[in-house]
Structure formats: structure tokens, C-alpha cells
Image (cartoon, helix red, strand yellow):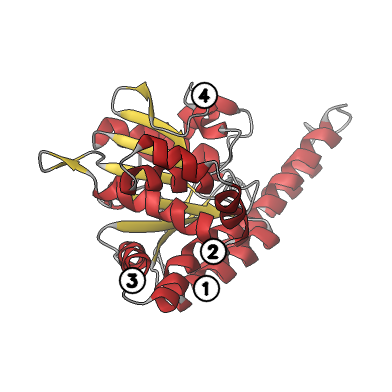
Amino acid sequence: MLDALLRRRVLFLLGKGGVGKTTLSAAIAWLSARRKGPTLAMESDGRAPMAALLGSRASFSPIVVSPNLSVMVLEGGHALDEYLKLVIPSRAIFHAVASSRFYQYFVQAAPGLRELMMLGKIYYEATSEKKATPNWQTIIFDAPSSGHALSLLRMPFAAHETFGTSVVGREASNIGALLRDPQRCAVIAVTTPEPMAVAETVENSAELARLEIPLAAVVLNRHNPAGFTPADLTRLKNSAAMRGRAQAKYICAVASAGLAQQAETRRALKILQSRVRCPILPLPDFSEFSGPALMARLAAELSTEPRNACAAK
């Protein structure tokens, strides 16, 4: 499934906070750089956690972190300044405009302007070419948490309705067309088996359908089915080998927790398969890893697919 997703120019990852979206985005970007060529990993968090995972620092412009892989922080105000530099050729005039009190007030007060500029920056990077060759084969965007991410995705359609055939309206229309084109853009929802995360994923899927943006895949992260059954646990508890052992209660408690996780994962898969119309990719729970080691482990797991992708019913 990953190879199919990497055929798109833009991968837009969204999900509830804490589901592992940033680490997964870094892993996909790392793989894309090796499989597809020049890759740009973009994130909206000014603290730049994805850049840190990839061994870099925060930067508002693309910064190379390894062969074929660059990272940057995407921020609406900086994207607007960059856009103005393109349309105002004089540096002196640009600085006069950008430093004016009216301009600063306008940037802060204009509803949705920052969101539109962020998507405009993604569109610009996705369509920029040098000598008829794209600057980037793939752009990975680690979007903000679901509520903000959906606000981002709504903005170009609202702007197009508001501004019509003006310059802003046409740019918004181009951005919206990119988001709705399954050949160029893949929106990927990331979730864990927890009920709140699954419910939010289902809600996000419904909202994307209303926006006519196809959901390309759902990643069920931290999916860790137990390799045993309740009957196996009962036999373990009743076995002569376990009687009188100090570790017996601890081992049984760990096994019971594993069965509970297995049941929660089954429920999550059942809900997702019935409510979300796209493939579902389960990824194991690598709780013993963190930081760059976890990113590398996820990249290794993604490299071995397709192994357990679940088609939507």
C-alpha cells in the first residue's frame, strides 16, 4: 500500500493528537527519499518534532537532512511573507509593507488567511519545477491535530466561494483541485485502537466526504494482537507449572492485558471497516522504542508491506 500512496505528489497525514502521526510522517518521508527521490517533509508544529526525529532543527525554509530528504516548518505568517516577496519585487517596498501596523493587524485579524497561505505553500512546492523536473517527488505534510487540520482543508473551498474569479479565488480553486485529485494527493488518517481516536477518525472521514476529498487510507497504529486466546490463558492459570510461582500473578496480568488489547483492536477494525471506505493498514505497537529508534522501526515495518492491509468493505 505504501508504494501506491507514494505515487502521489502530496501525502497529507491527519489524526488526533498522540496517535503517533509525527513519527509515522517522519518514517514515510525517510522511505520516500530512498524510494522516490527528492522528498520534502513539512510540519506545522513550530517546535519541529519531526525535524528532530530526522536529526535536524526548526527551519521555515527547506533544510537538507540527508540525501534526497529536506524538512521545514510550515507557518501561515511566514508563508504569507514569502508569497508577498514573490509579488512585490522591491525588497524595500516589501519591508515597508510587512513592518506596517496595518499589515500586522490585517494578518492577525483576517479569518483563515494563515490557513490558506499554509496550503498555498504546499501547492507551490508541489507544482514548482526546474527545467521541467519537479523540485520534489513527494511532499509529506504532518498536519496539526484533526480539528485544525479540517479547518485547513475547508479553507480553499470557502475562499473560492468568497473571492470567485479573483486572483485569490483562482489560487484557492487550484489548491482545492489538488486536494480533491486522488492521483496527486493522498489524505491519510492515523488512529490507534482507543475508542476516542477511532470515533474521531470516523468523524474525519465523514467530513472529508462532505468536502469531496477522498480518504486514501487509515493507519491503525499500535495494533498489537495477542498470539494466544482466552482458553490459552485459562490453561496457563491452571497449569501445575504456574502453581506456587511468585511470578504467576504478574505473568497472568500481562497476558490479560494483551487479551484486552486484542479485543479493543478487533472492535476498532470492525468499526473502521464498516464506516470508512478505504484500505486500513495496521501497524504493530513498538512500545519498547521511542524517538528516532521508533521511527526507524516503523520504517522497517512499512518496508515489508503489504502484509496485513485490510480492504474496506
Task: Specify the amino acid type for callout 4.
Answer: Arg
Residue 239 seen in this snapshot: no
User: Is disc 3 placed on a helix, strand or loop?
Assistant: loop
Residue at 33 percent of width and 71 percent of height: 166
Residue at 76 percent of width and 47 percent of height: 256
Cβ–Cβ below 8 Å for labels 2 and 3? no
Cα separation between marks 2 and 1: 8 Å
Closer to viewer: mark 2 or mark 1: 2
Residue at 31 percent of width and 62 percent of height: 178
Q: How many marks do you count on the picture?
A: 4
The answer to which quarter of the image holds residue 214 is bottom left
Q: Residue 31: x, y in percent?
A: 34, 34
Task: Specify the amino acid type for callout 1.
Answer: Glu
Q: Residues within 10 Å of mark 4 (few under 14, many from 20)?
A: some
Marker disc for residue 57: 4
**Vertical arrangement, residue 57 with respect to residue 305, above or below:** above
Earlier residue among tags 2 and 1: 2
Marker disc for residue 166: 3
Task: Specify the amino acid type for callout 2.
Answer: Leu
Closer to viewer: mark 3 or mark 1: 3
Earlier residue among tags 3 and 1: 3
Earlier residue among tags 3 and 4: 4
Cα separation between marks 3 and 1: 27 Å
Cβ–Cβ below 8 Å for labels 2 and 1? yes
For this rendering, which residue is in front, 280 or 53?
53
Cβ–Cβ below 8 Å for labels 3 and 4? no
Residue occupied by mark 1: 207
